């Protein structure tokens, strides 16, 4: 049987993670590690309640960690916090891949925060954050290993194919009317927007609620953006689609008021299109792996984006 794409090729767990970290980062001893999250490519652990350590799940994602480390080291100070890696671990016989740790950004993910609760300063910070990120020299980003149109998350055609591949999961989970809309979406080849003609920009490429950190104390303002392993050079619509997934057109329009880079004529259409594709991925991920909460999140976002676009 073929392994699931999110599977790991070796066990890890908090005990082994703590042992690896303590052996290579003795300043942190005694090390206590608690499971924080498991994503598609990495397992993350909270260490001594102060640090976050990320471990690759497979050999193939090691280059993504390495490019992430180089990019985050080079990025200037941004309006929102990003991981600043302090610790780097080497491969060993027990764990054959490098790993790395950064000081925890205090707060919690935005999965359970309604985007309508955001303050005006949060919207300003999001606009300024994307402006600064997308203005980072693309030539330097490529030197750090960030790829572009070879990654399916960076193009309209690539995102469309990912949505088509997940139609069965979506149709099986969605109410009838929504399922019919989703089927119509993936059968409408003419509905795929043209690719952006302007040069690509460095993009986080995975901005959505789970990777946006908000303060744990009220008022719950945005304080940081984490998980940069999917960073790539591509269309700025990819990053704005993550915000659309969270807060719809209202949030995107508000952020664009504070976005300092040029906005081309097709941007909003591409944002809505990519958002639908992201929702397909959510639902499929929930159905096949992460459970009902992800499935519901994707279906709710699909209902909203279809309603806002009038399709």
Image (cartoon, rainbow, N blue to C red):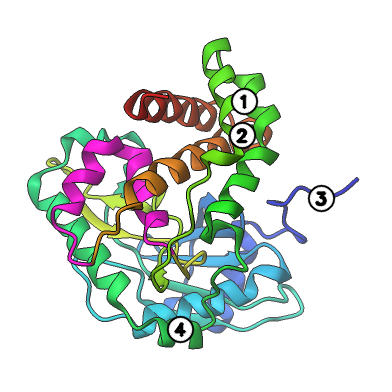
x and y percent of residue 273 in the render? Answer: 45, 42
- State yes or no: discs 2 and 1 in contact (Cβ < 8 Å): yes
As for residue 254 lying within the magenta part, the answer is yes
Mark 4 = which residue?
70
Where does the image place residue 251, in percent across and percent down from the top left?
A: 23, 41
Location of residue 181 with respect to 18 vertically, above or below: above
Q: Label 4's element?
A: helix
The local crowd at label 2, few if under 14, some if 14 to 19, many if 20 or more residues have their Cα within 10 Å, is many
Outermost residue on the right side: it is 1
Mark 2 to mark 3: distance in Å?
A: 26 Å
The answer to whether the residue labelled 4 contacts the one labelled 3, judged by CB atoms less than 8 Å apart, is: no
Residue 183: give its label: 1
* For discs 2 and 3, the disc positioned in front in the rendered view: 2
Residue found at x 52% / y 61%: 154
Mostly what secondary structure, the magenta segment?
helix
Residue at the image position 54 percent from the left and 81 percent from the top:
145
- Residue 47 found in image quarter: bottom left
Classify mark 2: helix, strand or loop.
helix
Highlighted magenta segment, given as a residue range: 235-261
The answer to whether residue 304 is left or right of residue 78 is right
Using the image, determine if residue 172 lies above or below residue 147.
Answer: above
Question: Which mark is drawn over residue 3?
Answer: 3
Q: Nearer the viewer, residue 100 or 297?
A: 297
The Cα–Cα distance between marks 4 and 2, rounded to whole angstroms, is: 37 Å
């Amino acid at each position: 049987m073929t392994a699931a794409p999110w599977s790991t090729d070796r066990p890890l767990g908090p005990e082994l993670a703590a042992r690896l970290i303590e052996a290579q980062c003795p300043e942190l001893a005694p090390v206590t590690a608690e499971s924080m999250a498991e994503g598609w490519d990495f397992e993350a652990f909270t260490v001594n309640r102060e640090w976050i350590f990320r471990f690759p799940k497979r050999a193939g994602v090691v280059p993504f960690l390495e490019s992430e480390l180089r990019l985050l080291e080079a990025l200037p100070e941004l309006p929102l916090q990003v991981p600043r890696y302090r610790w780097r671990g080497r491969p060993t016989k027990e764990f054959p891949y490098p790993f790395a740790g950064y000081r925890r950004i205090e707060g919690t993910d935005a999965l359970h925060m309604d985007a309508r609760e955001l303050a005006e300063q949060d919207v300003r910070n999001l606009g300024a954050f994307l402006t600064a990120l997308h203005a980072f020299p693309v030539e330097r980003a490529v030197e750090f290993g960030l790829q572009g149109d070879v990654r399916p998350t960076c193009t309209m055609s690539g995102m469309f194919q990912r949505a088509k591949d997940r139609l069965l999961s979506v149709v099986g989970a969605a109410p009838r009317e929504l399922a019919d809309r989703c089927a119509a979406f993936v059968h409408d080849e003419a509905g795929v927007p043209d690719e952006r003609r302007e040069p690509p920009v460095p993009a986080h490429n995975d901005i959505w609620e789970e990777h946006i950190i908000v303060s744990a104390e009220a008022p719950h303002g945005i304080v940081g953006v984490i998980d940069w392993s999917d960073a790539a050079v591509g269309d700025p619509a990819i990053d704005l689609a993550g915000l659309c997934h969270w807060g719809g057109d209202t949030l995107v329009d508000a952020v664009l008021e504070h976005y300092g880079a040029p906005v081309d004529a097709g941007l909003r259409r591409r944002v809505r299109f990519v958002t639908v594709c992201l929702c397909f991925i959510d639902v499929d991920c929930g159905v096949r792996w992460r459970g009902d909460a992800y499935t519901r999140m994707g279906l709710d976002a699909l209902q909203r984006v279809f309603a806002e676009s009038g399709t």
